[in-house]
Image (tube, grey):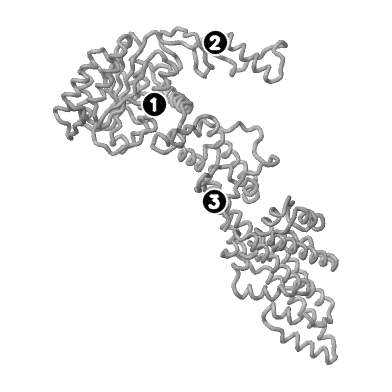
Amino acid sequence: MSTRRGRGRSRYGRYTGGDPLAPPVDLGEALAAIGEDVMAGTSPQRAMQEFLRRGGNELRGLDDLAGQVAQRRRDLLARHSLGGTLDEVRELLDQAVLAERKQLARDLDDDARFAEMRIVNLPSSTAAAVSELGDYPWRSSEARESYEQIKDLLGREALDQRFAGMKQALEGATEQDRARVGEMMTDLNELLEKRRLGEDTPEDFAEFMDKHGDSVPGDPQDLDELLDALAERAAAARRMLNSMTPEQRAELAELSQQAFGSPELAQALDRLDDNLQALRPGQDWGGSESFEGEQGLGLGDGTGVLQDLAQLDELSDQLSQQYSGAQMDDVDLDALARQLGDQAAVDARTLAELERALRESGYLDRGADGALRLSPAAMRQLGKSLLRDIAERLSGRTGQRDLRRAGAAGELDGSTRPWEFGDTEPWNVTRTVTNAVQRVAAEGGDARSGLRLSMEDVEVDRTEARTQAAVALLVDTSFSMAMEGRWVAMKRTALALHQLVTSRFRGDDLQLIAFGRHARTTRIEELTALEAQYEQGTNLHHALQLAHRFFRKHPNAQPVLLVVTDGEPTAHLDRSGGAEFAYPPHPVTLALTVRALDDVGRLGAQTTIFRLGDDYGLARLVDQLARRVDGRVVAPDLDDLGAAVVGSYLDARDSGAAGRGLRDPGGGRAD
């Protein structure tokens, strides 16, 4: 069988459908979905494939298209049967016999009685009866015409099997037309036999096309293209015969000798099939299908349906994207439009453009190991999206900070940024007007004749808060976080806080600390790609030591400690630096954890512990820990974790805030 994906390619031609004014592909939706999957432990490559498979809010994915392909295949098999030509021949034969018997009943001579006996005793087999009547002297002109139609039909159907459209093209053909077809078959076989011997030349093909170009399918540019088209059609014809019952095959083989009234056409077609199979052995010459419908197919139409089925199988393979090196550009858009309509091709083209844009946008890059990963640009874009979601959550809550503000006591930092909805910073007139002039010039206009501002031109002054903060975000990465479905929410929270600090509070320092059996500082790229590991231990002791070291490095900054956890401390560092684990928590573990927290508290850290889950022991313990350092505990819903952490950070760094323990910034409950 030929390798479908080896031939897969997108053929872009004239515009065939879709909205020409539609906006370009939306990378934001795709990137958000891919980022979610990556943070859940899926590779970026796999996450991109999954998005293409599922599709977006207004974009059908590969699964939908593949489902349509499968349904069309089932419909073709359920609707059709393969006895169409045999049924048509039987009908014409019955017409001829009936008309002849009527004529013989009117004739009273002895020859008429002999002929009548011959007609009455015809074989029951359609093919045998047609063969038996090959030399019969018809008395009825109507009967003779019906019989001649049988020979004409068989010839046109046989040719239509190999050359699509021949059945209609040769309808009403003269003897001269048939002779021209016979000459074409002879020349074609001679050309193919030259190819088998390696003796053909481009001039041979050009000469053949000059002479017979109007009789071959498509518009082949060389002999290989002609061979591909003929072999695909001939292989489908062979699969159609293989799909028939043995009785149907035997009847057709016998009837083929009567095509155009002689066996010459059948012999030429057999010679053609032999040449094509030798030159294109990779085609599927041995397959078959199970047709279950009642709508009979002629030989040519049946071969076309078998070609459709093969094309649908090829599309199914392309849409599956399961083979090595698969890309959306492999999908044959012309074939998809032919089988499912123009809109399906538009959807597939949009998916291909989306895949290409993701690869070319810089959101995905390859590491030293060759694997795709989310780039820093992608991390920033995901962080912005998460911040927008958090802003929406916070904006509806009384007393919450607007994330678009750079701080209560903002001061200009000398830079600008594009205006975003909700911004309150002053416009930078110079940059705004400059952008407008450049845009008008790029669009071919003349700024001297008047300038009209667009919102895309507007830039605002950046501001920074005067108060500097050193923020340590401690996130629990023990196995229970993944097992209880809190893994992605934790990563989303860290990414949102990282984006806020690095884009709006660049004077602040953020340290991410992940703690399981051991604790370690980590970059946001490492944390978002971190896979869950089955490792027992929640070493808050070690994490607090790393936070204390971080705060000591920033003596002039306001220390802010944020802890996200779902379990009691069950591990601590021993004198050698190894981790000691015990559950229930060992008194030594608890004592060392409290001592490390006290060390952080003595530095004046504003502490918030975010408790996930409803474990009573954990609730009692973290409440006691928070009271030791005049901190607070927040128990947010999982969906509100990001808003809780970001809101707490904003409040903690806002100098002069009072009564901060009375309000839960994340919408959960404060204990």
Residue 70 image offset from top left, x and y in percent = 55, 53
Front residue of this view, candidates 32 and 188: 188
Q: Which mark is nearer the camera, 2 or 1? A: 1
Q: Residues within 10 Å of mark 3 (few under 14, many from 20)?
A: some
Q: Which residue is mark 2?
A: 427
Q: Residue at x 46, y 37 (%)?
A: 370
From the viewer's side, name the closer residue of 492 and 273.
273
Q: Amino acid at mark 1?
A: Ile
Q: Secondary structure at mark 2?
A: loop
Q: Earlier in the sequence, mark 3 or mark 1?
A: 3
Q: Quadrant of the C terminus?
A: top left
**Type of the residue with mark 3:** Asp
Q: Single out the mark in the foreground, 3 or 2.
A: 3
Q: Secondary structure at mark 3?
A: helix
- Earlier along the polypeptide chain: callout 3 or callout 2? 3
Residue 191: quarter of image: bottom right
Label number found at residue 524: 1
For disc 3, the marked residue is 317
Residue drawn at x 47%, y 41% as measured from the top left: 50
- Asked if residue 641 is positioned above or below residue 17 in the image, the reply reads above
Task: Note whether residue 278 is visible.
Answer: yes
The image quadrant of residue 141 is: bottom right
Measure the alpha-carbon separation of dots 3 and 2: 54 Å
In-image side of 231 versus 38 (left or right): right
The local crowd at label 2, few if under 14, some if 14 to 19, many if 20 or more residues have their Cα within 10 Å, is some
Disc 3 to disc 1, how far (Cα)? 38 Å
Label 1 near label 2: C-beta < 8 Å? no
Q: Tag 1 or tag 2, which sits nearer the N-term?
A: 2
The one of 318 and 209 positioned closer to us in this rendering: 209
